[in-house]
Amino acid sequence: MMPAFGTGPNRRRAMVAAAAVGLLVVAGCSGDDSNTESTASATSGAEPTAEMDAAVAARLDDAIESAMAQASVPGAIVGVWGPDGTYVKAHGVADKTTGEPMEADFYSRIGSVTKTFTVTGVLQLVDEGEVGLDDPIDKYVDGVPGGDRITIRELARMQSGLANYTASEDFQKAFFANPDAPFTPEQLLGYAFAMPVTFPPGEGFEYSNTNTTLLGLVVEKVSGLSLADYVTEKIITPLELEQTSFPTDATFPEPHAQGYTTQTLDGAETTATDWNPSWGWAAGAMISTLDNLRIWGPALANGTLLSPETQAQRLETVSPPGYAPGVGYGLGIFEAEGWLGHNGSLPGYQTVVVHLPEKDTTLAIMINTDEAYEGGEPSSLLATAITQVITPDHVYRLAENAPVPGQSAVTTAPAPTS
């Protein structure tokens, strides 16, 4: 099975002494007495619709709780907004020690959903005539191997051939030796550039955090702003995403859940709640809430902040080998059976935010673990289970042999690599 699209520093568990990815710590999922419900409040855009039909909501409850139990997910926050109504609910626990329940208004680290913000920034600069999609990266950043032949478009569509710095054993050793340590973009690129390229530019596909890190540097060079300031001023503020932030350190607003991971030197489970996300930077450092992702999902899919011409180029996808039929990757966005958006995975947390234009429906999921289930992302298992209920003609599925809700995986799958 090919990986879901996510950030993770060690999705392969390639380093010495790391545990096998399939080894899961059983995490309790509580029953109805620990579920909390909340109505999303709009800060921008259309008001949420009326509550979903009770029978459909009950089916969603069952599907979510079954998938959580199957993949040992401690807690999940789920939102569905569309013509058929709104479903916003928290399931399970935020803290396995205290039993504190998840709440629908919690902040969460959103991992690779950050890529959608970074690439949107690049595309805004394209609209302003400051950047060309077919410009070589060496026009903006020096020292990139083959930088005279790698274009901005190829970086955004994961076709550069540059190695993923998070696959570097040296990076993994440094990160897991001290998850609180800060990393600079230059350090991250140093790990990537020390590894051989995997294919000539434009002649393959490899999901790589290196690509988005370079695009973050392009935004900084052209705009004269830090990436965090650019995203705040040009994306977060116009859309009134008041609970969304681009931290430059380990800052994590309250309230939030504890995040559980086995991405450790000895493979033992720990909480990664306060680990420094600087290693993810342009590819995975941001924080948001379910309500803000309700706004971002359709804005991203519909190109709210871009010209129609640029959005059309964004949605020109390539078909990654090994992914499920109906999956394509565009410029910092994917399509999965009509759903447009992205997912995110980093130690302790996973996120999915997608919008289905055909049904004008948005789905957002936040969970407090990244521990793989049968080689797959637990957030993807939940997304599959949810869309089987709400959009049976458009079931979210990324990996070709992904685990199926309620069933064991079809094959024994290798660990995700993103």
Image (cartoon, helix red, strand yellow):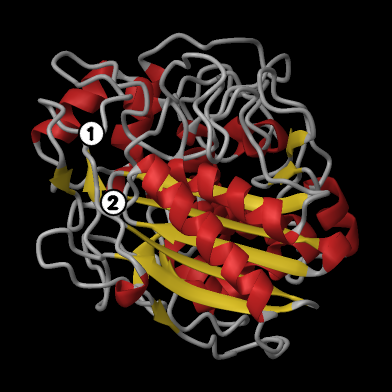
For label 2, the residue is: 277
Observer-nearest of 284 and 41: 41
Observer-nearest of 31 and 317: 31
Find numbered disc 1 in the image and state the secondary structure of the residue it sits on.
Answer: loop
Against 199, residue 117 (above or below) is below
| Image x and y of residue 42, in percent | 59, 90
| Image x and y of residue 38, in percent | 46, 85
User: Residue at coordinates 60% horizontally, 76% vertically from top-left?
Assistant: 87
Is there a contact, CB below 8 Å, between mark 1 and mark 2? no
Q: Is residue 283 visible?
A: no
User: Distance from label 1 to label 2 (Cα)?
Assistant: 14 Å
For label 1, the residue is: 263
Against 65, residue 230 (above or below) is below
User: Which label is found at residue 199?
Assistant: none
Q: Is residue 261 left or right of residue 311?
A: left
Q: Is residue 93 left or right of residue 115?
A: left
User: Residue at coordinates 52% horizontally, 54% vertically from top-left?
Assistant: 113
| Image x and y of residue 63, in percent | 55, 55
Observer-nearest of 353 and 31: 31
Q: Is residue 18 visible?
A: yes
Q: Indicate the amino acid at tag 2.
A: Pro
Q: Indicate the amino acid at tag 1.
A: Gln
| Image x and y of residue 119, in percent | 62, 51
User: Residue at coordinates 35% horizontally, 77% vertically from top-left?
Assistant: 103
